[in-house]
Image: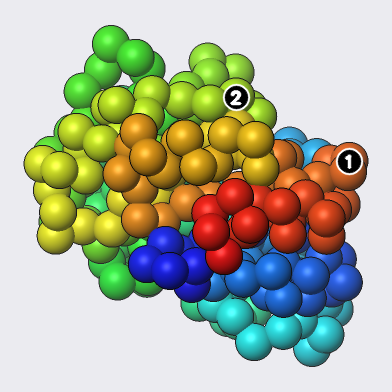
Amino acid sequence: MIGSLQLKVCGITRADDAAAAVRAGADALGFNLYEKSPRYVSLPDYRALAASLPAAPRVAIMVEPSPEALGEAAAAGFDLFQVHFRHDTPPARVRAWSAAVGPGKLWLAPKLPPETDFNPDWLPLADSFLIDTFSRDLFGGTGKTGDWEKFSQLQAAHPDKRWILSGGLSPGNIAEAVRRSGARSVDVNSGVESSPGKKDPAKLRALVAALGG
């Protein structure tokens, strides 16, 4: 934790990068189980990495998984489950994710078009919500900043939930993003990389320094 701010470093593919992230101040590590991601890590690859990872909560990043896939990720040793999904996903499917791992371990990451409001029916199903930059073609990972004001409004309207800001965050903009959004939890990925899936220790340190850490 950096002051009162929680930091998750996402897109981990190597044990050395995980160690560098934790040394810099990361509170959680994200592993992308989505096959279309350039930072994809399969469950067998993750299991091979697991013994070499530092002690920090491990987050499985998944896109509209089946409950069975969530169960497999839980069995592989993940602590938390970040589920990206389209805003018009049937409610029963979202409820199934919540039932599979429990609201306390579920981070819901809805893909919200700019003209679409956050659905309050999601609120009882998870304790944490990740708000990423909208893209019609991608589930996160755009490398572009999002609507920080909308994030601020959601966090203010539902202070009992944990709100995680994601999307294009880097050493150069993280301080402004936190100031304008009021975020207390942030998720970083491409902004601290030298290339997709390879974290840059210097950029990690610079980001934490920009936050006053």
The answer to whether 40 appears left or right of 188 in the picture is right
Q: Is residue 1 left or right of 88 when viewed as pictured?
A: right
- Which quadrant of the rendered structure holds the C terminus? bottom right
Residue 213 in sight here? yes
Determine the secondary structure under disc 2.
loop
The tag earlier along the polypeptide, 1 or 2, is 2
Quadrant of residue 60 within the rendered picture = bottom right
Residue labelled with disc 2? 144
- In x, y percent, where is residue 203? 77, 50
Q: Is residue 42 above or below residue 27?
A: above
Residue sitting at 29 percent across and 26 percent down? 149
Q: Are marks 1 and 2 in contact (CB under 8 Å)?
A: no
Please rate how many residues cluster around mark 2, counting C-alpha atoms within 10 Å: few if below 14, some from 14 to 19, many from 20. Answer: some
Q: Position of residue 32 (x, y in %)?
A: 67, 53
Q: Which residue is mark 1?
A: 195
Along the horizontal axis of the image, is 22 left or right of 17? left
Q: Amino acid at mark 1?
A: Ser
129 vs 64, nearest the viewer: 129
97 versus 120 height, above or below: below
| Relative to 21, 150 lies left or right | left
Q: Position of residue 98 (x, y in %)?
A: 29, 61
Label tally: 2
The residue lying at 79 percent from left, 70 percent from top is 20
Q: Residue at x 64, y 87 (%)?
A: 55
Q: Is 118 rendered above or below residue 190?
A: above
Residue 54 or residue 47, whichever sits in front: 54
